[in-house]
Amino acid sequence: MSKSVQSAILGRLTYNEQFRHYSTQIVHNDATIEVTLNVDTDDGVANMLPLAEQVWKGRSRHIKAFRDYAATQLLDELSKFLLADDEESEPITSKQLQRILRVPSSISFHFERHSKDNVEFCITGPGSVCLREHCLYVFFAGNGTIKGGEVVRLF
């Protein structure tokens, strides 16, 4: 098992034995995004890396899809969580959420369940103070279509 993998697009991805993934941090629009390949074999990295590079090259399109989906499909769920935390808080608007999600915190890649060939990815929204420890996940198929999303409380 390699301790790191070099990519012309992503740079050096380092293997984390505890979490069994390769990762790197890349700056986009003055913010750092963690890119993670959830794989623990050299063959898996070879299968996953081309999609990760392709997604990174098209990151603006995927990040926009992430923001749009979160601001339309996940806004109600997020609002319910936020109101449950603080009944006196002002509801967050779609426009505010899109601004908060300007740059996601991570893009992670993994194999589809029961597959060693089909890769999926997830874009995760930041744990912003405005979101009160909630994070937004949008899941994509390898072809870039959105499969779904969820709101998760971090703590």
Image (spheres, rainbow, N blue to C red):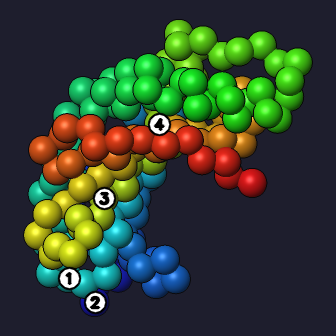
Which marked residue is nearer to the observer: mark 2 or mark 4?
Answer: 4
Q: 86 left or right of 40?
A: right
Q: Is residue 2 above or below residue 22?
A: below
Mark 2 Cα-neighbour bin, 10 Å: few <14, some 14–19, many ≥20: few
User: What's the distance in space between the residues labelled 3 and 1, CA to CA?
Assistant: 15 Å
Tag shown at residue 1 = 2
In the image, what residue occupies the spot 66% across and 25% down?
79
Tag shown at residue 141 = none
| Residues marked 1 and 2 touching at CB (< 8 Å) | yes
Q: Which residue is mark 3?
A: 109
User: What's the distance in space between the residues labelled 2 and 4, CA to CA?
Assistant: 30 Å
Q: 34 left or right of 133?
A: left
Q: Amino acid at mark 2?
A: Met
Looking at the image, which is closer to me, 91 or 66? 91
Q: 20 left or right of 8?
A: right
Q: Which residue is mark 4?
A: 104
Residue 118, image x and y in percent? Answer: 14, 63
User: What's the distance in space between the residues labelled 2 and 3, CA to CA?
Assistant: 18 Å
Along the polypeptide, which appears first: circle 1 or circle 4? 1
